[in-house]
Amino acid sequence: MDILTNAIHQRISSLEDSHSEGVALTSAYDFNSALEAAQRFSGVTTGNVYSRFTNPSVDLFERKLATIEGGEASVAFSSGMSAYLAIAITFLKQGDHVLLASGIFGTTTHLFRQYFGRFGITASIVDVEDIDGWANAMQPNTKLILVETPTNPLLAIADIEELSLIAKKHKAIFVVDNTLLSPIFQQPLKFGADLVLHSVGKFIDGQGRIVGGAISGSYDFIQPLKDYLRSSGTCLSAFNAWLLCKSLDTLYARMQQHESNTIEVYSWLKTQDKIIQIHSTIDPKHPQSYLISKQQSGHSPILTFAIKGGKKEAWKIIDSLQLISRCTNIGDSKTMITHPATTTHGKYKHDERQKYGITDNLVRISIGLENPQDIINDLKQAIQSINTPSYFEPLEKLDNA
Ligand SMILES: *Cc1c(COP(=O)(O)O)cnc(C)c1O
């Protein structure tokens, strides 16, 4: 059976006759006897105990996601960041070292540098595209490698298979953040990742309704994370899990539409003379096209383009839009636009932004599910509103923006 058909037909067993499975809004569960309670608590028998760590709706979402991701099991969390926190607390100890890919979600870098640094865990950043750089950055105490592929907002690719070999050689755990593609377009476990992480409020929910996180992998990696969840309490709510079950059923159809809209907008942007560069894996000249065709089966609906000019022109385009939302989120049915240098990457120092290519003339769009011609028409009038400048704004001035 196809994995998507299989996922759609998974049910909560106690609600077998309701065609659309209900939401298990309960904190606790009845036990038939004192013995049953004792056995459930001690883990001698499996079953529901308390919704902080066992809930039928959350369990259904985890099973559906594991099926689509090609993993043995999944565990859900209250947010993508609490999923990262779970990995760090479960698998690291004082004195360990972590390698983070350049271009990884800024808050993830902040979590490791700012907070785990205080507990004696060090972190280094490696250029995501530089395989030799990864091998050289490994230290005897490197226990964890975290990458996001493609990266946001520049759509650089990490070589999942090569990195998994480097990680295995050093007995480090290799985690891939798959948020930008969803399991429909990329299944990192097949290429050797130990764990795959999602901020599930992005494409997996896809409708901008919730915040949540999830991790998938083998039983051996997921069970310790579930044990941690019981102690940390950073659980996904049953209601959000129920919404996410519904979202998974339409994920394939939505990703197809996101992708075809993205191709249309990309093709139109290519014809615009005020656009000097477009970052997308759709670009046939993308420097890592071999890896893209190897590990991706579709393109991320994130498009980032550089316009002639600087912050002034970027902001002018953003402020002239009438349909597209000024919103720093990604993965919604509505198209959203943002200026990375002053929002998502505003915490980085100016030099760091330059080093990672987050220039002031970059604009990032998350393409939604609207009719693509309406997205193009809105971008057209916004781009027409800028006057091409004859100079580039001095970048230093922008640091306090
Ligand atoms: C949003 C995001 C996160 C953080 O997830 P939250 O659910 O917002 O905590 C992590 N990684 C990526 C790639 C994201 O886009």
Image (tube, helix red, strand yellow):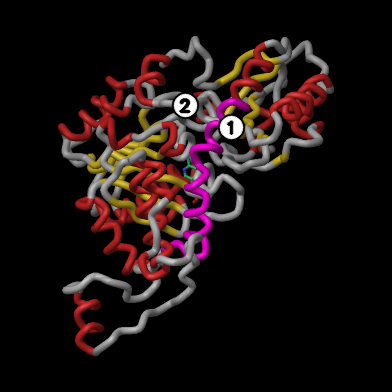
Question: Residue 317 at what x, y percent from top left?
Answer: 76, 28
Question: Residue 214 at what x, y percent from top left?
Answer: 40, 51
Which residue occupies 60% across, 54% down? 209
- The residue that mark 2 highlights is 298
Rounded to the nearest whole Å, what is the CA distance between mark 1 and mark 2? 11 Å
Question: Residue 122 at what x, y percent from top left?
Answer: 31, 44
Question: Given the current orientation, which residue lies at the most extreme front position?
Answer: 17
Which residue occupies 37% across, 61% down? 59
Q: Main secondary structure of the magenta part?
A: helix
Part of the protein shown in magenta = 235-261
Q: Which amino acid type is marked by label 2? A: Gly
Which residue occupies 42% across, 68% down? 15
- The residue that mark 1 highlights is 257
Camera-side residue of 95 and 59: 59
Horizontal side of residue 325 vs 286, given as left or right? right
Camera-side residue of 206 and 119: 206
Label 1: element kind: helix
Question: Given the current orientation, which residue lies at the most extreme bottom position?
Answer: 34
Camera-side residue of 35 and 174: 35
Does the magenta segment cover residue 152? no
Q: Is residue 127 visible?
A: no
Classify 330 as above or below 136. Answer: below
